[in-house]
Image (spheres, grey):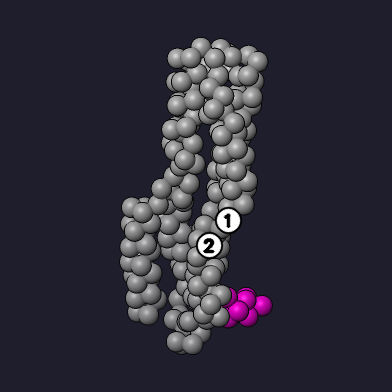
Amino acid sequence: MLLWTFIIFYSLILFIGWKVYRNSAKGRKKTLSYLFLLNLAVFYLGSISVHLWLNNKEPNLQDFVTVYGLLTIGVYVASIEVPGFLILSHYDEKSIGVLRIAREHLITSTFDFSPSIQSLQTLVNKHKSRLEELHLFANLSYFVQSSNQMKHINRSVLDLLLIEINQSVRSVSQKSKHPFPKLIDVLSLTGLSFLIAQLLR
């Protein structure tokens, strides 16, 4: 009875968390929303496995909290923390790649105007949402549009764009790759991180 109560409660909390996260997350973080469903699936599988391992017997309250508490932590690490780290790392690497290509097109436009501007326009259109998230889409679009109208590069915008892109590359590189960095701060402040570390010893 205690196990099913815990499973229902966990499922409800996770579903509410998923709904809130999906509605509030944008761009980079949006890619993590499906990990909540993965977490729930792994949790169900883990709970059934532990229940069978205990020979279908429900442990006393203290043992239940220990066993299923460790299970919950393990499931979180395996289904959200590690995959989330890999997904965010890949997303950021792709963003840096797009920024570096844009920078390359900007530089080559100073001596090879038409092909570089055309390539830059294609890149900007292809990665519109990513560049909007980095607050660079409007400026890059303006540079392309104004340069095409002038038939040569817009020098007044070019230098500023190169500075912005370099700053964005540094900013993306330094972003936390943890799916929920604020959770780490909360755990640290409450001392739960130390408690979890002791339980996992």
Name the side, left or right, on which 161 lies relative to 3.
right
> Residue at image x 49%, y 25%?
143
187 up-or-down from 118: above or below: below
* Span of residues in magenta: 192-201
Q: Quadrant of the N terminus?
A: bottom left
Name the side, left or right, on which 96 lies relative to 151.
right
Residue 87 is situated, as x and y percent measured from the top left of the image, at 55, 48
The one nearer the camera, 7 or 193, is 193
Find residue 176 and name its label. Answer: 1
Residue 77 picture quarter: bottom right
> Residue at image x 65%, y 15%?
111
Q: Judge whether residue 67 can be spotted in this image.
A: no
The one nearer the camera, 44 or 168, is 168
Q: Earlier in the sequence, mark 1 or mark 2?
A: 1
> Residue at image x 37%, y 80%?
2
The one nearer the camera, 117 or 156, is 156
Q: Secondary structure at mark 2?
A: helix
Q: Judge whether residue 30 can be spotted in this image.
A: yes
Dot 2 corresponds to which residue?
A: 181
Residue 90 is situated, as x and y percent measured from the top left of the image, at 58, 43
Residue 156 picture quarter: top right
105 up-or-down from 26: above or below: above
